[in-house]
Amino acid sequence: MEVVAAKKMKTMALEVQNFIGGEFIPAKTHLDSFNPATGEVWAKIPDSGKEEIDLAVKSAKQAFPSWSSLSPEVRGQHLHKIADILESRLDEFAEIESRDQGKPVGLAKKVDIPRAVQNLRFFATAIQHTLNDSTVQSKFGVFNYTTKNPIGVAGLISPWNLPLYLLTLKIGPCIAVGNTCICKPSEMTSVSAWMLCEVMKQAGLPPGVVNMVFGYGHKVGQSMVEHPEIPVISFTGGTATGKKIISSSAANFKKLSLELGGKNAAIIFDDADLEQCIPMAVRSSFTNQGEVCIATSRIFVQEKLYPRFLELFIEATRKLKVGPPTESTTDVGALISKEHLAKVKGYVDIAIEEGGRIECGERSQDEELSLPESHRNGYFMRPTVITNLKDTSRCMQEEIFGPVTCVVPFQTEEEVIERANGVQFGLCASVWTTDLGTAHRVAHKLEVGAVWTNCGLIRDLNMPFGGIKASGIGRESAKESLNFYTEDKTICIKMT
Ligand code: NAD
């Protein structure tokens, strides 16, 4: 297989192949993948199913004994090599990620691809530092110690919003500890994962360690989840899919990690520093078109500050430039698909029906979007701010996953904690105050997996990340991911 250079890809739809046992395998049938910024088909993705998954399981099983017996140092070297090649092609990968997903190229260059490189490097070194437990039980005259063992073939299923970023966050720890895997990227954003296969091949990763099977979730994903020889599934995606995965995998007692949706609150107290808060509230609501699981979508502002906050927030939001992802001045690119755009715009209509006031963006008095002719069929929309909604309204309860955020006032600390917790999700939140006591008190009471205070969108791979309630099961981080992808065994030795 030859990965065609980014420039050549402009003219014809490129044909993606599955990567199984270190070989690129042409598919019998394909599905269309669209460039969200133009609405044109730009790639053909294998429409795979159970047959391809069976083949990939066979190859991953074959690769497991030798890969898992390599030392952590050697496995780490493989990951470093992949990271180095990926980094040397950063610009090309960023352009492709943008064309496939709709995000600004600048964002992919600054965040997505560097983070993918970092994910691989981080876990290449993290496995060099793991410590096993040991105890001495003198009353029995025994010594216990643990070993951490890779599990076998893992199924890694990833979403479309941060394609390579989230996929490498799974591949890194999974293979670093000695598992082999089958990856299923989103059918809407498969191209960077396909290109990664070429990088892995070039880096000399042994065949079968990472297999990539492309296609629809209900076919490929479902086959993986039901497959008796894939004992572990790491999934990032929607809450509804997560629920389905739990029930489909139950019969085989699979180990599951589920990173799901969110409805994240920002809580802004009267004493907040607005100079810091406004730019971050805008970034965390609209970066990547709001298609980020940790995006802010409910903003609670204490009543004295509310009018000033709203004025500045709307002013800053209106300044965001929506446009072609390739332009360096673009802040907000295209949404992932026609259907998703309709769904997100539909929420603005729902908000109006529910009594909401549209302060800026879609369905407001603001100017219509002006796009170049080449992008008129792209899936663009203006960042939208909604006020005057009840907490029970659908826009305040459901994950919209687009450039729409709701702002509401509150009076007391107790009240806002209860309201922020009053959703089915529990991924993350941010708290804005200059009072340290308030910051700690509120952070402790929020039902979420992560709280940022006077900052946001920061993720340290050393720290556990994940949600509670309908936002997921399990955590990802150095320690947590390495635990998830291994099984501990306790060995007891008689000393006397
Ligand atoms: P999705 O659930 O539709 O799809 C995610 C992946 O699952 C895709 O690869 C899809 O093909 C596959 N899939 C679909 N049906 C399946 C099935 N029955 N069995 C197995 N796999 C199946 O999610 P999406 O629309 O791609 O992504 C957006 C969602 O992801 C949002 O809800 C967002 O909050 C969530 N997300 C969460 C995190 C996190 O860390 N918590 C990060 C990013 C995105």
Image: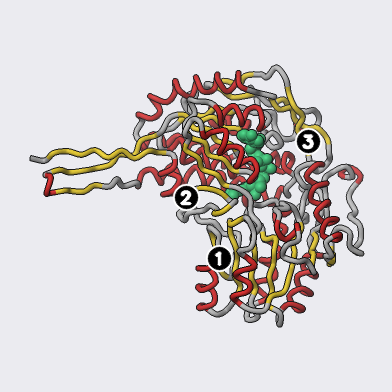
Mark 3 nearby-residue class (10 Å; few <14, some 14–19, many ≥20)? many
In this picture, is 44 found above or below 417?
Answer: above
In this picture, is 218 found above or below 256?
Answer: above
Specify whether 182 is left or right of 188.
Answer: left
State the residue at coordinates (59%, 33%).
196
On the image, the x and y values in percent for residue 146 come to: 28, 41
Q: Which of marks 1 and 3 is in front?
A: 1
On the image, the x and y values in percent for residue 302 come to: 68, 77
Element marked by disc 1: loop
Kindly identify the amino acid type of the residue bearing the numbered disc 2.
Answer: Ser
Q: Name the residue under label 2.
A: 477
- State the image quarter where residue 274 is shown: bottom right
Q: Which of marks 1 and 2 is in front?
A: 1
Among the two numbered marks 1 and 3 on one chain, the one whose residue lies closer to the N terminus: 3
State the residue at coordinates (44%, 39%).
485
Marks 3/2: CA distance? 33 Å
The image quadrant in which ligand 1 is located = top right
On the image, the x and y values in percent for residue 186 come to: 66, 36
**Residue in front for this viewpoint, 298 or 465:** 298
**Residue in front for this viewpoint, 286 or 90:** 286
Kindly identify the amino acid type of the residue bearing the numbered disc 3.
Answer: Phe
Q: Mark 1 points at which residue?
A: 446
Among the two numbered marks 1 and 2 on one chain, the one whose residue lies closer to the N terminus: 1
Among the two numbered marks 3 and 2 on one chain, the one whose residue lies closer to the N terminus: 3
The answer to whether residue 338 is visible is yes
In this picture, is 120 found above or below 448?
Answer: above
Marks 1/2: CA distance? 21 Å
Q: Mark 3 points at which residue?
A: 34
**Residue in front for this viewpoint, 242 or 45:** 242
Specify whether 68 is left or right of 413.
Answer: left
Element marked by disc 3: strand
Marks 1/3: CA distance? 39 Å
